[in-house]
Image (cartoon, rainbow, N blue to C red):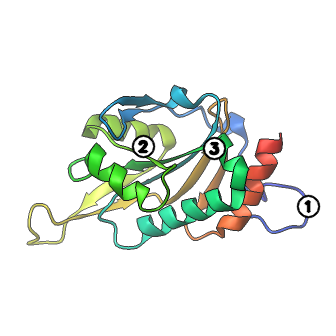
Amino acid sequence: TPAHTDNAASATDAIDPRDRPAPRYLLQGPRGQAIRSEDFHDRFQLVAFGYMSCPDVCPGTMQEMKLILASLGEQAKQLQPIFISVDPDRDTPAVLHEYVRTFDDRILGLTGNARLVRWAADNFKVEYKKVMEPGAAPGSYAMDHTAGNYIYDINGKLRLFTRYGNKPELTATDIRKLLAG
């Protein structure tokens, strides 16, 4: 279902907010400080899950996020972009902060211990798992995970989901319509 009713192309799927309860998270920000979902009650949230060692999908998702923010221009101030790492063993808050800054300074990198990351992912209905090749070194693994961007309104309700690989300009158009109310 398109996110809006005119004949223009849409990059997103419309979500009935009643279909999804507001997701909650309690994770660590760049300086190790606690960050909660409720901390952004005055802004929409653009949330993606991934990990820094990802060879292609996660950097692509981050590039999409960067282009969405650029397309929104001044309206981007009404949006908090967030990247949540599903690899807390390797992605420390400080290192994650440096990673997200390479895409855009406005993106907030969040992580936490394995239990808190799992709780956040479960609340977003994001699936992820560690994948190791037979005979691989202990620190040599990949993380399979749900890929895309979740857009939540100021009430914490899921409004849109964009699949990985969608056109950022179309996502920005859909976000503009949501921001306009």
* Count of numbered badges drawn on the protein: 3
Residue at image location 66% in from the left, 49% down from the top? 76
The residue positioned 52% from the left and 49% from the top of the image is 106
Looking at the figure, which quarter contains the C terminus? top right
Q: Which of the marked residues, 1 or 2, is nearer the chain's N terminus?
A: 1
Q: Earlier in the sequence, mark 1 or mark 3?
A: 1
**Label 1 environment density (alpha carbons within 10 Å; few <14, some 14–19, many ≥20):** few
Q: Is residue 84 left or right of residue 1?
A: left
Q: Which residue corresponds to mark 3?
A: 79
Residue pictured at 73% horizontal, 42% vertical: 16
Q: Amino acid at mark 2?
A: Ala
Dot 3: few (<14), some (14–19), or many (≥20) neighbours within 10 Å?
many
Q: In the image shown, does 12 or 82 lie closer to the viewer?
A: 82
In the picture, the disc for residue 121 is 2
**Quarter of the view holding residue 108:** top left
Disc 1 marks a residue whose amino acid type is Asp
Q: Nearer the viewer, mark 3 or mark 2?
A: 3
Q: Residue at x 34, y 41 (%)?
A: 30
